[in-house]
């Protein structure tokens, strides 16, 4: 086990003392006027890295995504631009409204799944793998077009049962540590865990560049990391449970500004 893994387990085990006295009922969400991005808790240097596009390492993924947007692919020999045109104009605000409901599958889709749907059905190409360079690049590029836009989850009643599932998962105790997301991110935000401040867990900057990862990663990668930290079995990438959690987390962050591509420790 690495030193960082040991610190993570020790810190989480200590946090169970706080969680043990917490009420079992579902908590009230953080009031809208008290929500804050974890950007506010970063060091001056890390903030500067995110704010300066020439220093932000995630901008390399953006450049790759822009190239993919304009590259013809698949047996249809089409690019994203052939259908959608200029991403800066046509994709503005789009990512702030995902996940959304898809009438073909009768299920909610996150942005990665929408990209793959276009890639396979319209371009007739092999789907991108989750966390692949291509998927992260395209997602980051599309998300960038919504930077500064308010998160605006769709007001679609068909999404409500899935959003409620996400809320239940967020409040459900899991793993050997018997913790839920709510115990860290609602009950103990602002406190220290493994030397870092516990954030409120608003998904404002994904895909995100984490210095810990030395790479760009998706929100689902972060959710999997948390589940592993709680010693729980993570879902497979693209699982309906993750999409339901994304729905709830985006609703929880409604009105907050998209930061993609964000940088975090």
Image: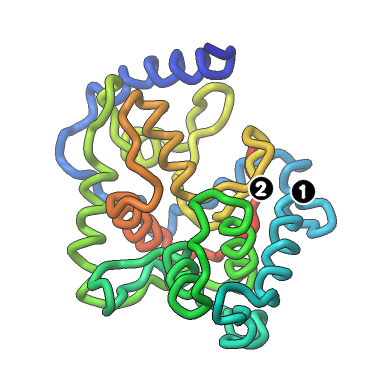
Circle nearer the N terminus (1, 2): 1
Compared with 41, 36 (above or below) is below
Q: The residue tagged with tag 2: helix, strand or loop?
A: strand
Quadrant location of residue 91? bottom right
Find residue 101 and report its horizontal and vertical position in percent. Answer: 30, 74
Q: Which residue is mark 1?
A: 49
Residue drawn where x is 42% and y is 38% of the image: 224
Q: Nearer the viewer, residue 76 or 222?
A: 76
Compared with 155, 5 (above or below) is above
Find residue 102 and report its horizontal and vertical position in percent. Answer: 31, 75
Q: Is residue 21 left or right of residue 150?
A: left
Q: Quadrant of the C terminus?
A: top right
Q: Between marks 1 and 2, how big is the CA–CA gap?
A: 7 Å
Q: Is residue 74 left or right of residue 169?
A: right
Residue drawn where x is 42% and y is 42% of the image: 223
Q: Nearer the viewer, residue 202 or 131?
A: 131
Crowd rating for badge 2 (residues with CA inside 10 Å; few <14, some 14–19, many 20+): many
Residue drawn where x is 35% and y is 50% of the image: 30
Q: The residue tagged with tag 1: helix, strand or loop?
A: helix
Q: Nearer the viewer, residue 226 or 52?
A: 226
Find residue 241 and report its horizontal and vertical position in percent. Answer: 28, 50
Q: Is residue 181 left or right of residue 61?
A: left
Find residue 149 and report its horizontal and vertical position in percent. Answer: 56, 73
Q: Is residue 189 left or right of residue 19?
A: right
Compared with 42, 165 (above or below) is below
Q: Which residue is mark 2?
A: 263
Asked if the residue at tag 2 contacts the one at tag 1, i.e. Cβ–Cβ closer than 8 Å, the answer is yes
Residue 220 is marked as none
């Amino acid at each position: 086990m690495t030193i960082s893994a040991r610190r993570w387990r020790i810190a989480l085990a200590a946090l169970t003392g706080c969680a043990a006295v917490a009420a079992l009922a579902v908590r009230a969400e953080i009031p809208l006027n008290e929500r804050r991005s974890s950007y506010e808790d970063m060091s001056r240097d890390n903030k500067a890295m995110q704010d300066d596009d020439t220093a932000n390492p995630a901008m390399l993924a953006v450049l790759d995504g822009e190239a993919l947007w304009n590259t013809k692919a698949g047996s249809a020999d089409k690019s994203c631009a052939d259908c959608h045109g200029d991403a800066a104009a046509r994709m503005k605000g789009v990512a702030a409204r995902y996940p959304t409901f898809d009438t073909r599958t009768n299920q909610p889709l996150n942005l990665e799944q929408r990209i793959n749907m276009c890639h396979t059905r319209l371009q007739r190409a092999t789907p991108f793998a989750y966390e692949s360079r291509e998927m992260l690049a395209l997602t980051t590029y599309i998300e960038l077009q919504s930077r500064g836009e308010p998160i605006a989850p769709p007001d679609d009643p068909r999404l409500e049962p899935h959003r409620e599932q996400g809320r239940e998962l967020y409040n459900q105790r899991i793993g050997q540590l018997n913790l839920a997301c709510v115990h860290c991110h609602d009950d103990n935000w602002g406190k220290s865990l493994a030397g870092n401040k516990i954030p409120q867990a608003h998904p404002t900057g994904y895909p995100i560049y984490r210095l810990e990862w030395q790479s760009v990663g998706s929100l689902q990668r972060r959710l999997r990391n948390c589940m592993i930290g709680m010693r729980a079995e993570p879902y497979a990438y693209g699982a309906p449970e993750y999409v339901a959690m994304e729905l709830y987390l985006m609703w929880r962050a409604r009105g907050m500004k998209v930061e993609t591509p964000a940088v975090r420790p």
